Image: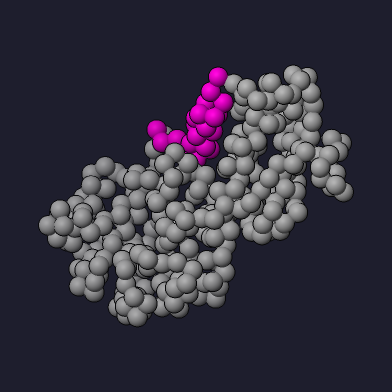
């Protein structure tokens, strides 16, 4: 039941993907320049501002915000005073920005966009992980992510305590219903995958989606499968599938899972649950940038 990964030097690392997305976000937002800050704020003005949380949740995206400032606001020092994964509540200041007032204001929204969305995903993931406590079932994300910022969203899932399913189409074979239909049979699809990996000298997990008990038996009979994805099974059907598999391969429940029903799948004994909900329906954590002068009683850290 190997969970190996493809090694391909042509695939950008998650950090490289993040930096590419940040560069695109800067170009999208700043255009020909931040005319409001240029009009209102003296060029040599220096200020300090704090990132204040206004909701309850799990903070994430602090490293992303740091990279936002590093890319487009080089005359600003960004200093996190919390860590990604910390639980926060209203009034907590999680980071400070000090330096060029114009650059602080120009970078504000981009930094907040990443922090708020990533924090929402981390908070939702932490919630699902807590709901599964004691079952041994692990939480997976999916590829149902926002185009261009998958690396950020999957990082947020990890911060919340979840596990990344696959980064893209290159690091796992996932045989779904249409693959089976187009290949002609479950046996043909699985054997084609195994032959491909052997010929290419590649090693990636082979995961097979099954729609019913017969497909589950066919996938087991085909051999060479690392995990069976139980698609839209009820909890009772999932429990029966786990019993039938008998630990020979990992099992994963998927399709329609959410915080209201995920516990029942954990209790059914599956090894994993995958939820598109984590990344396609997060509630952003409310965070604001506030000038230091407006944060009464809260002092920024000293440079020393």
* Residue pictured at 62% horizontal, 24% vertical: 34
Task: Examine the image and state in which quarter residue 11 appears.
Answer: top left
Q: Is residue 303 left or right of residue 95?
A: right
The structure residue drawn at horizontal position 41% and vertical position 54%, both measured from the top left corner, is 142
**Image position of 142 with respect to 245: above or below:** above
| In this view, 103 is above or below 111 | above
In magenta stretch: residue 16 = yes
- Residue stretch in magenta: 10-32
Image position, residue 13 (x, y; %): 48, 38
Residue closest to the eye, 213 or 149: 149
Task: State whether residue 23 appears in this view.
Answer: no
Residue 233 or 55: which is nearer the viewer? 55
Tell me the quarter of the image containing the C terminus: top right
Magenta region includes residue 40: no
Instruction: Classify residue 59 as left or right of residue 209.
Output: right
| Residue drawn at 69 percent across, 53 percent down | 54
Q: How many marks?
A: 0
Q: Is residue 48 visible?
A: yes
């Amino acid at each position: 039941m190997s969970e190996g990964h493809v090694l391909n030097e042509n695939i950008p690392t998650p950090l490289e993907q993040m930096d590419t997305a940040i560069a695109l976000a800067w170009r999208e937002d700043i255009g020909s320049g931040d005319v409001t800050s240029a009009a209102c704020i003296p060029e040599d003005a220096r200020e300090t501002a704090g990132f204040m949380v206004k909701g309850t949740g799990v903070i994430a995206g602090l490293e992303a915000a740091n990279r936002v400032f590093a890319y487009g606001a080089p005359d600003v020092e960004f200093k996190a005073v919390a860590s990604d994964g910390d639980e926060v509540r209203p009034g907590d200041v999680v980071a400070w920005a000090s330096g060029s007032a114009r650059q602080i204001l120009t970078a504000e929204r981009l930094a907040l966009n990443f922090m708020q969305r990533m924090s929402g995903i981390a908070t939702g993931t932490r919630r699902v992980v807590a709901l599964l406590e004691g079952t041994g079932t692990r939480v997976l994300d999916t590829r149902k992510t926002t185009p261009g910022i998958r690396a950020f969203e999957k990082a947020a899932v990890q911060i919340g305590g979840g596990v990344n399913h696959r980064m893209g189409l290159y690091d796992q074979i996932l045989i779904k219903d249409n693959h089976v239909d187009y290949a002609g049979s479950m046996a043909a699809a699985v054997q084609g995958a195994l032959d491909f990996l052997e010929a290419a000298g590649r090693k990636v997990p082979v995961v097979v989606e099954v729609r019913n008990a017969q497909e589950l038996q066919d996938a087991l009979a085909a051999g060479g499968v690392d995990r069976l994805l139980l698609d839209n099974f009820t909890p009772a059907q999932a429990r029966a599938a786990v019993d039938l598999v008998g630990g020979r391969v990992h099992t994963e429940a998927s399709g329609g899972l959410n915080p209201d029903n995920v516990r029942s799948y954990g209790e059914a004994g599956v090894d994993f649950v995958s939820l598109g909900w984590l990344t396609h329906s997060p509630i952003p954590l409310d965070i604001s940038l506030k000038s230091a002068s407006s944060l009464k009683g809260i002092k920024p850290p000293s440079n020393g």
